[in-house]
Image (cartoon, grey):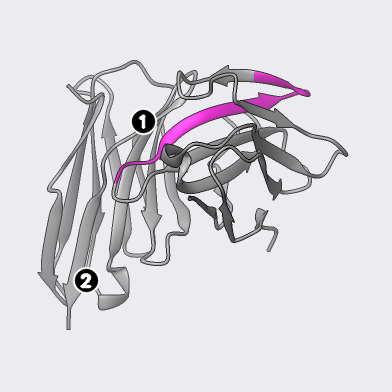
Amino acid sequence: KNEVEQSPQNLTAQEGEFITINCSYSVGISALHWLQQHPGGGIVSLFMLSSGKKKHGRLIATINIQEKHSSLHITASHPRDSAVYICAVSGDDMRFGAGTRLTVKP
Amino acid sequence: EPEVTQTPSHQVTQMGQEVILRCVPISNHLYFYWYRQILGQKVEFLVSFYNNEISEKSEIFDDQFSVERPDGSNFTLKIRSTKLEDSAMYFCASNGGVGLGEQFFGPGTRLTVL
């Protein structure tokens, strides 16, 4: 069983839709990270959180430590949001989920 | 805005050859990391480095791998005798310290072993 599970694997949405990507983990962590990987391969850190909720523009990330679950929400999605979104957890090292490929159609 | 840089962007090598991948972390950062991503697979942790020594390493990081911070700015990953299965994208990252914010990733080096 993977230590970091993401769902869905693939997600297609129409521009303007509200998007939710889920992440569950089974190991102890000091923080959870949401990353965005662009088609060219580059990785950008979106959020690092250890409790509660963070918001940056149209992106919102939440974490429930007791349930070992996090969600990434995108409001008013746009084609430029199309990317792979990766959940990762850090403790002594960093463990990554397999990613969710998001395609937003105009 | 400060950024992590990596060179080269693409390295092609023959099996059995040594390669050195270079990274310049953000200048005031203290923790440095190497990750790899085999095509079509998830990102995997290789090693973390702090205070001129390895903090943590994964089971992937065996004796053929080594890391070094030779001059206070560069952070290198050496693969001593490359294998076909070492073909991957290698990412360097840095942050200010454990619990001190998110990691900043470099653009990656694509290593192709023939």
Tell me: B103 left or right of A76.
right
Find the distance from the CA under tag 2 to the CA under tag 1. 25 Å
Q: Nearer the viewer, residue B43 or B81?
A: B81
Q: Position of residue A1 (x, y in %)?
A: 17, 21
Quadrant location of residue A2?
A: top left
Q: Which residue is mark 2?
A: A76
- Residue B42 part of the magenta segment: yes
Q: Position of residue B85 (x, y in %)?
A: 41, 38
Per the rendered image, the range of residues in magenta is B41-54
Q: Amino acid at mark 2?
A: Ala
Q: Amino acid at mark 1?
A: Ser
Mark 1 lies on a secondary structure that is loop
For disc 2, the chain is A
What is the magenta segment's predominant secondary structure? strand
Q: Position of residue A26 (x, y in %)?
A: 24, 19
Q: Which residue is mark 1?
A: A51
Mark 2 lies on a secondary structure that is loop
Which quarter of the rendering shows the C terminus of chain A? bottom left
Query: Quick one: which residue is furthest to the right in this view?
Result: B71
